[in-house]
Amino acid sequence: MLVALALGVVAGIALGEDAQSIKWIGDLFIRAIKMLVVPLIFFSLVSGITAVGDVGRLGKVGGKAMLLFMTTAIVAVSLGMGLSALVQPGTGLTIALPAGTDVPPPPDQSLVAMIISLVPENPIMAMAQGAILPVIVFAVLFGVAILVSGKDGAPIARAMNSGSVVMQNMTIFVMELTPFGVFALIAWVAGTFGFDALLPLGKLVALNYVGCGLILLVVYPLILRFIARLPVRDFYRGIVDAQAVAFSTASSNAALPVTLRCVERNLGVSNSIASFTVALGATINMNGTAMYLGVIALFGAQAYGIELTWMSYVMIALTATLGAIGAAGVPGSGLVMMSLVLTSIGVPLETIAFVAGINHLLDMMRTMTNVTGDATVAVAVGRMAGEIDVAEYRSADDV
């Protein structure tokens, strides 16, 4: 990936504006990403909900976990928007809109109209049109209905889980094209915009690491101190192995076995709480991704000169939160969710072309943040349910 990034920069500088001739390879990669959005979100959400097992558990343990996951996601995307508004990474990078298009008007729906639009009149049409928020609402209701149906819904639950696995594998297949897409896109960026485009990309990398660092060092410790009422240092000592695997693989799913071991053996959370919360978190908890989506949305708007209204910020927060929940725990899924957020505020999807080249550098830190959040919520829920061995949590005898 880094080799493709470096070669792309060299090729772009060498070819200059002629680098446009290989941009079609990157465009093909972006189209493949857009192809995954609707089915990946639908199957991932339904599978995550049905994994709870029964509605009672969803309301008790699942309700507390979901509340923490949603709250931290909202805080994360707000943090991302705040950092991007402060640093203005897209300012100074003037990008022309795609040929034949004008600056799209910002969302001007009233809050009531936006709420009404969340419920699809025809879910199939919503999927065909790429109206992601109505698809998410339908997926959540569909998943809950499967749980309520009990044994009668079990075959569909298994089908949804299989569909989720299939879409994750399909995402991995598309991500195998990443080096080629990265090479073509970064060559186009460097050849068309020169070094002026590389500075904003450097700002994006810095904002990603700063934002994730604030979540790791401020948001999660607040949960541990004031909700779980446990020492922060013992937590990070016990979860370090999972963080290392998450950072190196950039995949929440790949880190799942190690995360479970750390949460149970090192942090003392009961098996029932740990297995449920960590597995659920690997599916729907993507705080690092939510933060980054907030950064990217404002970056794209700044680069294309698109004015955002207060409703635009509401849409960013809503779509980034729900998009992070719908993201699969595999490398590169953040690129898929990016199209959801950008579309909601009228920012051209060509923005993805600028960040695809550095996505893996960002994905590693985001994934470590996501996995740490899974463990944080597992500890908090275990503490509230009285299913955590505090002595084991404080013990330095980690495995």
Image (tube, helix red, strand yellow):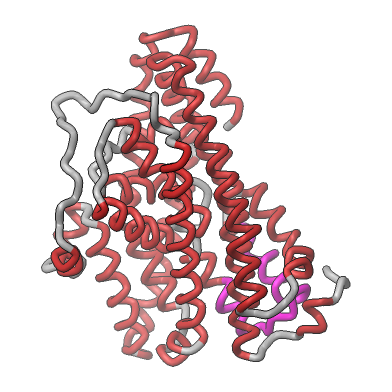
- Residue 274 appears in the picture as rendered: no
Q: Residue at x 22, y 64 (%)?
A: 134
| Residue that protrudes farthest toward the left in the picture | 121
Whether 275 is among the magenta residues is yes
18 in relation to 360, above or below: above
Q: Quadrant of residue 91?
A: top left
Q: Residue at x 37, y 85 (%)?
A: 147
Range covered by the magenta-colored residues: 254-278
The count of marks equals 0
107 in relation to 113, above or below: above
Q: Main secondary structure of the magenta part?
A: helix
314 in relation to 306, above or below: below
Whether 339 is among the magenta residues is no
Q: Residue at x 62, y 54 (%)?
A: 368
Compare residues 222 and 343 and report the one nearer the observer: 222
**Residue 349: image location, x then y, percent:** 30, 38
Q: Quadrant of residue 118?
A: bottom left
Compare residues 141 and 312 and report the one nearer the observer: 312
Compare residues 304 and 263 and report the one nearer the observer: 304
**Residue 155: image location, x then y, percent:** 36, 80
Q: Quadrant of residue 140?
A: bottom left
358 in relation to 285, above or below: above
| Residue that protrudes farthest toward the front in the picture | 86
| Residue that protrudes farthest toward the right in the picture | 397
Image quadrant where one finds the C terminus:
bottom right
Q: Is residue 41 left or right of residue 201?
A: left
- Residue 377 appears in the picture as rendered: yes
**Residue 8: image location, x then y, percent:** 51, 20
Image quadrant where one finds the N terminus:
top right
Q: Residue at x 19, y 45 (%)?
A: 106
Q: Is residue 258 left or right of residue 173?
A: right
